Amino acid sequence: KTATADWLMSQTKHRPQVAIICGSGLGMLADTLKCQDSFAYADIPGFPQSTVQGHAGQLVFGELKGKTCVCMQGRFHMYEGHSLCKTTFPIRVFKLLGVETLIVTNAAGSLADGFQTGDIMIIKDHINFPGLVGLNPLCGPNDDKFGPRFPAMSGCYDKGLRCLAMEIAKELGVASVLQEGVYAMVGGPNFETIAEARLLHRLGVDAVGMSTAPEVVVATHCGLRVFGLSLITNKVVKSYEDTESVNHEGVLEIGRLRSHTVQQLPNSLSYF
Ligand SMILES: O=P(O)(O)O[C@H]1O[C@H](CO)[C@@H](O)[C@H]1O
Ligand code: HPA
């Protein structure tokens, strides 16, 4: 990680305070950065590679409303075959670069009854299903340089940033599509069966996806302030009568349709 951070610092003058991870189809979050320096993951020493459609695979540095940001256009998922250590590798690199705040975004399916496709959910908390059974990026020897052996996760989605996001959404006139809820990470890559969807619903899950939780665990471990957003790209099928089914192209399409709205919140938040 240190070698990667040193290499990046030798290649760009930007010293980011905020890092943004773009979810599936949400790579356009990087487009508004000014004075960009971009690096393909393939050219960054030690960096994993993106293999999923809708994840461009480059790191973009730039300025956003006077703050310096680094944006991952493309994240790493466990189902791609990466170890959890690899999927979260960039988080510790960001910490070494001086980042203080992490903004995570993702595409997710909704289970909550009141949610609509196209809504934006502020993540209040998560259920890390792989983590609960021991698939956790913090497994193995603890690196005390980054954080404690047994980190607390009770406040991992910063309350101040969540309240601020609500206020900003009202000012932007997008409060009607804003929700707040619990995100659950499942392993993927298959989407849920109807029985699994019903289970998640009964457990109080509002939105489900195949990423984010490991990144937030590693970020919280090393003391980053975290804000998370899910774009609701589909309703998870919970009824045997329902003939619709979800697919990745549909997920990416909702990202394109909602790009402008999704862009606004992280843009305004990174200012604080
Ligand atoms: O979580 P992100 O990367 O946004 O992507 C979500 O969308 C993909 C499925 O369409 C899965 O990778 C799921 O995790
Ligand atoms: O319905 C879903 N399930 C899991 N992951 C997802 N990512 C987007 N939509 C979904």
Image: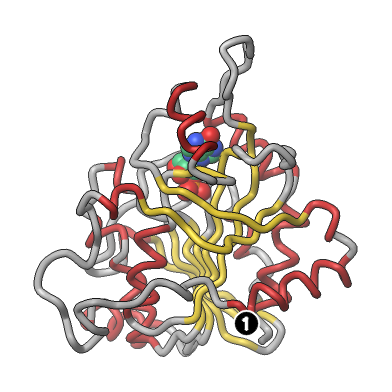
Q: Residue furthest front?
A: 202
Q: Position of residue 229 (x, y in %)?
A: 60, 59
Quadrant (top left/top right/bottom left/bottom right) for the C terminus: bottom right
Q: Position of residue 66 (x, y in %)?
A: 68, 89
Q: Quadrant of residue 52?
A: top left
Q: Nearer the viewer, residue 168 or 162?
A: 162
Q: Position of residue 251 (x, y in %)?
A: 59, 36
Task: Note whether residue 124 is visible.
Answer: yes
Is 187 placed left or right of 270 in the picture? Answer: left
Few, some or many C-alpha atoms within 10 Å of disc 1 (few <14, some 14-19, many ≥20)? some
Vertical order, 205 against 137 (above or below): above
Q: Nearer the viewer, residue 185 or 266?
A: 185
Give the SS element for disc 1.
strand
Q: How many marks?
A: 1
Report the residue at 41% width, 89% height from top.
Answer: 98
Q: Is mark 1 within 8 Å of ligand 1?
A: no
Task: Note whether residue 55 is visible.
Answer: no
Vertical order, 137 against 226 (above or below): above
Q: Amino acid at mark 1?
A: Glu
Vertical order, 53 against 130 (above or below): above
Report the residue at 58% width, 63% height from top.
Answer: 124
Vertical order, 120 against 216 (above or below): above
Report the residue at 69% width, 37% height from top.
Answer: 113
Q: Position of residue 147 (x, y in %)?
A: 26, 84
Is 66 placed left or right of 158 in the picture? Answer: right
Quadrant (top left/top right/bottom left/bottom right) for the N terminus: bottom left
Residue occupied by mark 1? 63
Is 127 placed left or right of 181 in the picture? Answer: left
Report the residue at 51% width, 62% height from top.
Answer: 125
